Amino acid sequence: MENHMNDGMVQLNKVTKAYGSFQLDCSMEVQPGMATGFVGANGAGKTTTFQILLGLVPPETGEIRIFGKPYTELTAKDRERIGVSLADSGFSQFLTVRDVTAILRNLYTRFDEARFLEKCQRYELPANKKIKDFSTGMQAKLKLLIAMSHDADLLILDEPTLGLDVMSREAMLEELQEYLDSEGTGGAPRSVLISSHISSDLEKFCDDIYMIDRGKIVLHGETDVLLDSYGILKVDERQYQALDRRYLLAGMREAYGYRLLTNERRYYQENYPDLVMEKGSIDDILILTARGEKL
Ligand SMILES: Nc1ncnc2c1ncn2[C@@H]1O[C@H](COP(=O)(O)OP(=O)(O)OP(=O)(O)O)[C@@H](O)[C@H]1O
């Protein structure tokens, strides 16, 4: 099947996998030209989802498509269109940037060697030092630069900012944004699927966000919409009893009363102007959605 613009770059449909008591059951989509964030607690199933997506781990059931094709039907040329950064993968720790450059040159027809070396230099990654002697942050930068080195149309990045200090994170996100904004094969839009524990990274960079909890997608929305229409209400018992609860999604008991999640922030601001309403970050939304009591 040919790749059509309307096909998602990535489509996971009811993909399941069990590891003991852990049960993954995940459906998600990455659209052309979009950065899609994947957020969840430790052990929620992010890495497992990425491993299944990349054909590294077989799912039990479900359908997986990249560029509109099942992973098993992707050609070498299709695979070249995917740039990957996974937590426990990459090149042997005993190689240097110089060695990696030679491998990338052989591996990818569209490897942009001059650009890759220029970026390595800019981010102070020494050419002749073994990767094992790089700091965690340097290794993270190298992995990201490798993922972006061969003109891929789709980047699949598991925790790419892990171990980066705040300035390096900013710089790498800028690199990613620049990459996303540039054109892919034949002018096609590029896409990024990115997981992160640092939700401010996702808030800044991602067009939409999936939240996963204990193997299930608990929330999916456009980042702007999530940040614009969701809010956190802080109320005491008396205020809680008097509250219209139609637009409350979840809540948690706190020392002062309740912390409540709504997806109709303005409704409560207009109708209950005296109540404390916070905007709510992606982390707040995730915590209340995943751990709060459904209302
Ligand atoms: N190869 C495996 N064998 C057995 N259990 C596994 C295996 N890989 C993952 N799991 C289990 O699957 C669950 C999901 O793990 P996964 O690594 O996908 O989570 P994650 O969301 O990426 O977490 P983290 O944020 O900590 O990296 C965990 O309970 C983990 O122990």
Image (cartoon, grey):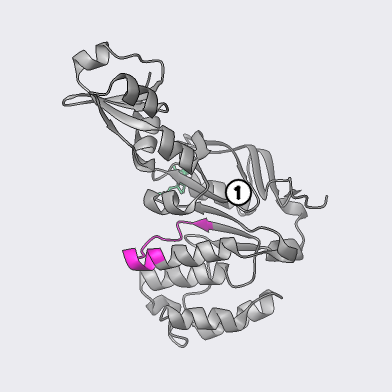
What amino acid type is highlighted by mark number 1? Answer: Ile
Q: Residue at x 69, y 66 (%)?
A: 80
Badge 1, how many Cα within 10 Å: few under 14, some, many 20+?
some
Mark 1 lies on residue: 52
Q: Is residue 99 left or right of residue 169?
A: right
Image coordinates for residue 18, horizontal then vertical, percent: 54, 37
Q: Is residue 89 visible?
A: no
Residue lying furthest left in this view?
255
Q: Residue 48 at what x, y percent from top left?
A: 53, 47
Q: What is the total number of numbered labels drawn onto the structure image?
A: 1
Q: Residue furthest top?
A: 242
User: 137 or 210, which is in the foreground?
Assistant: 210
At horizontal 70% and vertical 47% (from top left) the residue drawn is 65
Q: Position of residue 257 (x, y in %)?
A: 20, 22
Name the one closer to the observer, 229 or 111: 229
Q: Tell me the quarter of the image containing the C terminus.
A: top left
Q: Is residue 295 magenta?
A: no
